[in-house]
Image: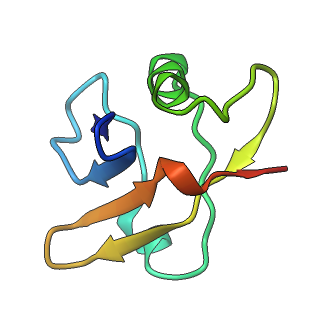
Amino acid sequence: MVNPLKQGMIIRVCDSRDKYAQKVKTYQMNGDYCYELYSKDLLENMQSVSEKWEDACSYRIYGTYNSTFDAAFFSLKDIVSL
């Protein structure tokens, strides 16, 4: 879920049968792990939120994981160009 007003993104656990879901193993979110996104729709949605994003570039976004809600929050204001 991308929130354009707060320039943030939340990734949470959902039904594994959802064909539109991005598959992420939750144990990988419990430490200093990275995860690459390949969903064109999600990346375009994230890019539309911030003017910092440029086509054909790679970025890193740091987030925090909340085990109570099985969700991770990422601020799209704090992207780092690679």
Which quadrant holds residue 53?
top right
Depth check: give the residue in front, 64 or 29.
64
Q: Residue at x 35, y 73 (%)?
A: 65
Compared across the picture, whether 22 is left or right of 59 comes to: left
Quadrant in the rendering for residue 33: bottom right
Tell me residue 63's x, y (percent): 47, 66
Q: Is 34 displayed left or right of 81 in the figure? A: left
**Quarter of the image containing the N terminus?**
top left
Q: Quadrant of residue 18?
A: top left
Q: Position of residue 49 (x, y in %)?
A: 46, 30
Q: Give the residue at x 81% y 22%.
A: 56
Q: Position of residue 37 (x, y in %)?
A: 57, 38
In the depicted structure, whether residue 50 falls above or below residue 60: above
Q: In this view of the protein, which residue sits in the foreground, 76 or 16? A: 76
Q: How is the image coloured?
A: rainbow
Question: Residue 47: where, in percent of width, then height?
Answer: 55, 26
Residue shown at 32% from the left, 50% from the top? 11
Total numbered circles: 0
